[in-house]
Image: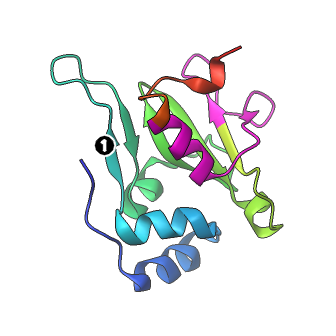
Amino acid sequence: MFNPPAPESKFEQFSKDTGWSLPAGYKDFLSVHNGARLFRHIKNGGGYELLSLEEIKENHLDYMPKHWYPISINNGDYIFIDSNRVKEGRDDYLVRFDHDNDVSPQIGSHMKMNFENWLERLIIAQGTEFWHWK
């Protein structure tokens, strides 16, 4: 299920309120769908929650690195955007944390990809955590 689009004015306000930069590809997604729920099983739940701009702010907790903001939650696992890397113009700005670990820069795993690659591969893999494949 996809949410309605975020208006352009929300992007500016989000960055102003948080100090976080939005990568172009992620901003494009939000301008079409301000969040989504993907691969949710009717009986078992689960799946991926792609957070809206409002939910990103609500889900960024004090113990999380200040320059990382959550964009997806899956059974307690997080996908973050490293805003500092976005500001540097880098495309390898995604970071993931497994729910078994504390959220800290030392434990996070940089995914070496951008949002567009992650979402495309997630869809191709039908919601499977392809980043764990060997």
Left/right of residue 95 with respect to residue 112 in the rendered view: left
Q: Is residue 98 above or below residue 60?
A: above
Magenta range is 96-123
Q: Position of residue 4 (x, y in %)?
A: 25, 66
Q: Where, by quadrant of the figure, is residue 47 drawn?
A: top left
- Packing grade of label 1 (10 A; few <14, some 14-19, many >=20) is some
Q: Position of residue 127 (x, y in %)?
A: 43, 29
Which residue: 57% across, 40% down? 79
Q: Nearer the viewer, residue 11 or 123?
A: 123
Q: Nearer the viewer, residue 86 or 24?
A: 24
Three-letter amino acid code at the position of disc 1: Arg
Verify whether residue 42 appears in magenta: no
Verify whether residue 104 appears in magenta: yes
**Looking at the figure, which quarter contains the C terminus?**
top right
Q: How many marks?
A: 1
Colour mode? rainbow
The secondary element bearing badge 1 is classed as: strand
Which residue: 16% across, 18% down? 43
Q: Where, by quadrant of the figure, is residue 97 drawn?
A: top right
Which residue: 38% across, 55% down? 55
The furthest residue to the left: 43
Q: Position of residue 61 (x, y in %)?
A: 53, 45
The furthest residue to the bottom: 9
Q: Would you name the residue on which mark 1 appears?
A: 37
Q: Position of residue 131 (x, y in %)?
A: 64, 26
